[in-house]
Image: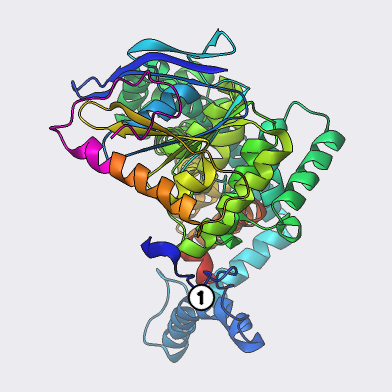
């Protein structure tokens, strides 16, 4: 279980990016974090990844405190961040340097097949389209089999069609080993398609505003009325999060009470 | 949602490099480079041949060429070229090793940079020829002092190139290394060095150029063989053809070794997605 306890981050220039964020995320759960710009979404993700240190509060994974990057936690960024001097296959195998070559090759080959890029194995990253490059990034993060995979607006730079395709693809890959997914997004559609639970944050300082359980079976039909309902409730919550007259909601209530308004 | 309408998928194949140039164009390109020196040489030859100049101080290419063949026939040329090449090679090797190591260290560890870099920069500000008397006192008049001087010349551009390039590596790429928990040496080997390779090749070429510059300085000071010695000998005995012969050979050797670096590095830089590549260099 990934536990965030009163995680706060104040930057040296005094900006309070994140204030007392607490949440518990169960193994295999998919959580989307959504919120207006500057609400500390990325700050939170970077603290969980161990890339930045929280000013106060703790991040623990299975009772182990996270202060630096951890083998069980993978991250996918907004940009693919492939290493341009490595072939696609070598990029995917980047995190497997400790394994014997044969085993690494086998895992990379399987991952290439799973992201449908086998024929691009020896291509350079510059020869890939945006969607292909992000698929390689997903494969690179998943191939060491992390327990937690963090995604920082992973599809926001892609066109709508490719984005949908990759969302479905991500769920497909997730089903293989069922890691915990924690996804930062500003796309309501994406949050409702992917997440079991949506955490809405509000800015200045960045903090938890609301949580919404998405009680929808999978695969989800983007056109069903129920789907629309959930989207509407997330949108409403987002609107309210930006309305400064609305007080913070006590974020300790259980599931099923999300639509309290 | 606005984004519901399916949009044309972005093309999965970015444009390949432009169609291969025709054979004529491919062979014509290197020819283009020798056009200017060839025209100048032929022009001067003609001027002397017609008699507009006696060519005593600036001998025509034919006389320079005759001098080179004469030196080659007596075996002198090989001896001088070997001596010079050997000095440059050793000095270059030492300078590159030291420059790369120290450059990588002070590029990576900020503490090392604060300790080391001001001193190195101060030393760099010293005109390198100022070391010559000291090196001769310390290391003697023979090979060691010459190689040390060349190494000093090579060291600074390599050091500066490596350090500057490491400092300029994209933070986002370094973060990828951090998320995979690379240790310091692994980070240098697997992320930083490959990332700086294009800049590194440039600094090697600059370093080599300085190496050639300093070998002349070293050989002008006190040598009994080498191309620099040929220069000095030509001056003292009033043989401009020999001076020009040595200069031509310097040009050829310098260009050749520079080209060797370029060719040797090319396979490692095929991944680059750069302006220069698309134009077929």
Residue range corresponding to the magenta coloring = A238-261
Is A112 situated above or below B126?
Answer: below
Residue at image position (57%, 44%) is: A83
Q: Is A200 positioned to the left or the right of B10 in the image? A: left
Q: Is residue B94 visible?
A: no
Label tally: 1
Q: Is A12 positioned to the left or the right of B71 in the image? A: left
Is A215 situated above or below B234?
Answer: above
Q: Is A204 positioned to the left or the right of A59 in the image? A: left
Q: Residues within 10 Å of mark 1 (few under 14, many from 20)?
A: few
Which residue sits furthest bottom? B50
In the image, residue B132 lies at what x, y percent?
A: 41, 28
Is A241 situated above or below B184?
Answer: below
In the image, residue A116 lies at what x, y percent?
A: 72, 56
> For this rendering, which residue is in front, B125 or B139?
B125
Q: What residue is pinned by disc 1?
A: B33
> For this rendering, which residue is in front, A6 or A150?
A6
> Residue B13, located in which quarter of the rendered image?
bottom right
Residue at image position (57%, 22%) is: A26
Q: Is A209 positioned to the left or the right of B41 in the image? A: left
Q: Reply yes or no: does residue A79 show up in magenta.
A: no
């Amino acid at each position: 279980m990934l536990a965030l306890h009163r995680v706060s981050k104040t930057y040296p220039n005094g900006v309070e990016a994140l204030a007392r964020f607490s949440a518990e995320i169960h193994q295999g759960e998919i959580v989307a974090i959504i919120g207006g710009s500057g609400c500390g979404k990325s700050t939170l993700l970077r603290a969980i990844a161990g890339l930045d240190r929280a000013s106060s509060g703790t991040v623990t994974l299975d009772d182990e405190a996270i202060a630096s990057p951890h083998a069980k936690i993978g991250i996918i960024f907004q940009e693919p961040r492939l290493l341009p001097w490595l072939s696609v296959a070598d990029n995917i195998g980047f995190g497997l340097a400790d394994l014997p070559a044969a085993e690494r090759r086998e895992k990379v080959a399987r991952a290439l097949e799973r992201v449908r890029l086998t024929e691009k194995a020896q291509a350079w990253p510059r020869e890939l389209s945006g969607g292909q490059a992000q698929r390689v990034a997903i494969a690179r993060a998943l191939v060491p089999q992390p327990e937690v995979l963090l995604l920082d607006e992973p599809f926001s730079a892609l066109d709508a069609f490719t984005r949908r395709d990759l969302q479905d693809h991500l769920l497909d890959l997730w089903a293989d080993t069922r890691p915990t997914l924690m996804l930062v997004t500003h796309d309501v559609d994406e949050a409702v398609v992917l997440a079991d639970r949506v955490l809405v944050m509000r800015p200045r300082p960045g903090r938890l505003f609301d949580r919404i359980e998405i009680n929808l079976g999978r695969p989800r039909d983007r056109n069903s009325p129920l789907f629309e309902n959930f989207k509407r409730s997330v949108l409403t919550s987002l609107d309210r999060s930006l309305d400064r007259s609305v007080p913070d909601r006590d974020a300790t209530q259980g599931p099923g009470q999300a639509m309290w308004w | 949602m606005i984004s519901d309408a399916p949009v044309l998928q972005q093309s999965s194949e970015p444009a390949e490099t432009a169609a291969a140039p025709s054979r004529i164009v491919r062979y014509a390109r290197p020819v283009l480079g020798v056009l200017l020196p060839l025209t100048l040489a032929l022009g001067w030859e003609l001027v002397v041949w017609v008699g507009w100049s006696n060519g005593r101080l600036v001998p025509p290419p034919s006389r320079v060429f005759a001098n080179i063949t004469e030196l080659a026939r007596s075996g002198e040329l090989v001896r001088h070229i070997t001596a010079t090449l050997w000095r440059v090679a050793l000095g270059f090797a030492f300078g590159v090793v030291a420059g790369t190591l120290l450059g990588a260290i002070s590029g990576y560890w900020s503490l090392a940079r604060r300790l080391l870099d001001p001193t190195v920069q101060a030393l760099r500000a010293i005109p390198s020829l100022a070391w010559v008397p000291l090196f001769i006192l310390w290391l003697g008049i023979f090979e060691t002092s010459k190689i040390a001087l060349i190494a000093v010349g090579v060291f600074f551009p390599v050091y500066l190139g490596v350090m500057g390039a490491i400092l300029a590596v994209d933070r986002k790429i370094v973060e990828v290394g951090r998320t995979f928990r690379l240790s310091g040496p692994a980070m240098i080997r697997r992320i930083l060095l490959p990332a700086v390779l294009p800049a590194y090749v440039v600094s090697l070429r600059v370093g080599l150029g300085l190496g050639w510059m300093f070998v002349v300085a070293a050989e002008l000071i006190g040598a009994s063989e080498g191309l620099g010695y040929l220069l000095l000998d030509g001056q003292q005995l009033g043989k401009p053809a020999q001076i020009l012969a040595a200069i031509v050979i310097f040009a050829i050797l310098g260009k050749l070794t520079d080209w060797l670096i370029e060719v040797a590095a090319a396979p490692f830089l095929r991944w680059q997605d750069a302006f220069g590549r698309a134009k077929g260099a």
